[in-house]
Amino acid sequence: MKKYLPFIAASIALVVYFLTTCRAIWIGDSGEFALALQTFGIAHPPGYPLFTIQGTLFVQALSFLRPAFAGGIYSITVAAAAVGIVFMIMRRRLDDVTSFGLALCWAFAAIFWAETNGVEIYTLNVLLIVLTYFALESESAYKWPLTIYLFGLCLCNHPSSLALAPAILYRFFAEGEYRRVSRFPLYAGLLAIAATMYIYLWVRSIHDPISDWGNPEGLSALWQHMSLKQYSGWVHNSWDNLLFAGQLYVRSVLECWSWPGLLLILSGIILGFKINAVRTINALLMLATALFMASFHQAVNHEPFFLPPLFASLLLISINIEALRHKASLRSVASWAVVAAAAVLLVLNYRANDKSDYTLYDDYSHQLLDSALPNSTIFLAGDINTFGATYLRFAENYRPDLKIYDRSIRKRAMFERASELTGTGVTDLFESRTAILKHEQGRLYLSKSHYQNEPDWWEGLDSLFSFGTLYDTRPTDQPAKAVPAYPASYDPGDLMSRELLVNLDLIRGEELLLPGYSDTAAALAQFRLALGRYEAETRGVLLNQLGIYFRKAGARDLALETYSRALEKPILSSAQRDEIRFNISNIYKDRGNIAVDRNDYAEAVNAFVQALEYDQKNERLLLNIGLIYAQQLKENNNARRYLTRYLELEPGDSRVVQLLGTLR
């Protein structure tokens, strides 16, 4: 019976995951991944070749299911396998009952369980990490070849697995493996063999798959894809970011195992150097490296990036039980307490992770495609709100009359179509879009996506005409399909679905501001509905994004309220806080500029002074305030004060020096 316990733990997890996983298109990158698996395509950087190859085989074997559901079953299968490996890691130092309980505490931890809701790469990432760690702790004669090869496979899936590197190096030197120089060519060869997975991206891209993110043909393009160059502008590191990553880690632990888990991690560190120094050092190295890496990229949906440090934390938690090895009665109580904790996690987290009847994203994706008239072209934003529509069109052949392009998955196809229409080679994103809009026949639309990463996707066009969930590039007398409305009480429970609902609220509000409606009060009601959906959210950056939209829509008072709420949210880095304060200053600048246009200079200077409170080193503001005091309000003392501050920042402005000399 004992030898089957890993399979029993994995099977329990698999059954629970199967009952709760989404049967339709899950939100986020799941639509993009499902399309890549169905079409044997190329996913976003770094490309995830191992995930794509394995997942494609899995989806083809389950071809009687929707590809999105089949891909989800692949995700839950590797997640369940990871649970079995966690059991085997724990069993090396603990009894069966404790190992079983700890494996299920991992299985039903909120953050890991959430990654089984749809097609995602993080479950495979965890499986590869725990497999590599299992090999690292083994006593097998093949330990090092196996560890190094598995680590190479880790790097073919997700860069967060680099958190293992210091722990591997520590064992490599501590065990004296570095002295066996004759084996180094073997280890280098194993890493190279694992890296050949990336050749898939090059070879597959040559055959022009439907899903061809980045078109990684050739060595240079392949390296750019593998090295995440596309995201280089989002990578920032500082002490503030590192502290913020630590804050997010603590929140992740609390979300998974609450305060008892955090206390057990701390006590595990204290006890660890005496009880199991090697595992403790391994865990701490993984934890520190993972947090350092997480500090480089502060994603809004940060939780999956903290799975490697959470696994390291589980290792530290296990040391507490190991410390009771000579106290049989206490150890038995503790073992069954761990099993009970796993049962509690199952009950507490089941409802939040039960997405078996989730259809929001599926419904929205159908709505997006159905909004277009027959034989039309749609330019999608290539973001989490539109991946599902691309999936439906090409993985399920829904609305085959439509031509679909975007800045991500279908960018190469857009270049090729633009070149065909113009008779010239077009390789620029916006140039190709412009060429298609100019020469393509039929209706041409752009998706409305107010939460995309690059909002300039539809900017720079001469004119756009609101058409439900789409923008039409030409005026039409056809009625738009009604934008679906969801009540304030509807909460699917996850961040990205809330973002989708907010996007729909903003679209409805935008429609109400159009000529022919011009119902400002009703539009503001929709905007407030959007704001209300983030009431329970702890991330200030979400409200900052919302405030930016409100300002653009002319709802400045609501934008100011939204920014103020953003500053109150607990998850907020110092850089994000500075950006929000700058955005608040923009509202007051707007008010000041409007007052200047009305020749209300007292109100203008009051607004600019308020703006300065949030943007204290803005030389333009200091100059404007000083000039208004000097030239309009004739208050020389105030004028001198602000112009002097201005000259501290811009000492070379001779005109202001001269003006200051005339003020008495």
Image: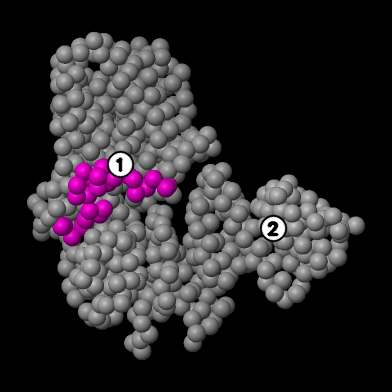
For the question of whether residue 329 can be seen, the reply is no
Q: Find the residue positioned furthest to the bottom.
A: 477
Residue ID at (34%, 24%): 166
The magenta segment: 208-234
> Dot 1, crowdedness within 10 Å: few (<14), some or many (≥20)?
some
Q: On the image, which quarter does residue 590 sit in?
A: bottom right
The amino acid pointed to by label 2 is Leu
Q: Is residue 213 magenta?
A: yes
352 with respect to 645 (left or right): left
Q: Is residue 101 magenta?
A: no
Residue ID at (55%, 73%): 524
Tell me the quarter of the image containing the C terminus: bottom right
Return the residue at label 2.
621
Residue ID at (37%, 47%): 231
* Number of numbered callouts drawn: 2
Q: Position of residue 248 (x, y in %)?
A: 47, 39
120 with respect to 484 (left or right): left
Residue ID at (78%, 64%): 628
Return the residue at label 1.
227
Q: Nearer the viewer, residue 109 or 140?
A: 140
Marks 1 and 2, how far apart at CA: 41 Å
Report if the CB atoms under discs 1 and 2 are less than 8 Å apart.
no
Q: Which numbered disc covers residue 526?
A: none
Q: Nearer the viewer, residue 190 or 28?
A: 190
> Dot 2, crowdedness within 10 Å: few (<14), some or many (≥20)?
many
Task: Determine the secondary structure under disc 1.
Answer: loop
For the question of whether residue 488 can be seen, the reply is yes
Tell me the quarter of the image containing the N terminus: top left
The amino acid pointed to by label 1 is Ser
Ranked by sequence position, the earlier of labels 1 and 2 is 1
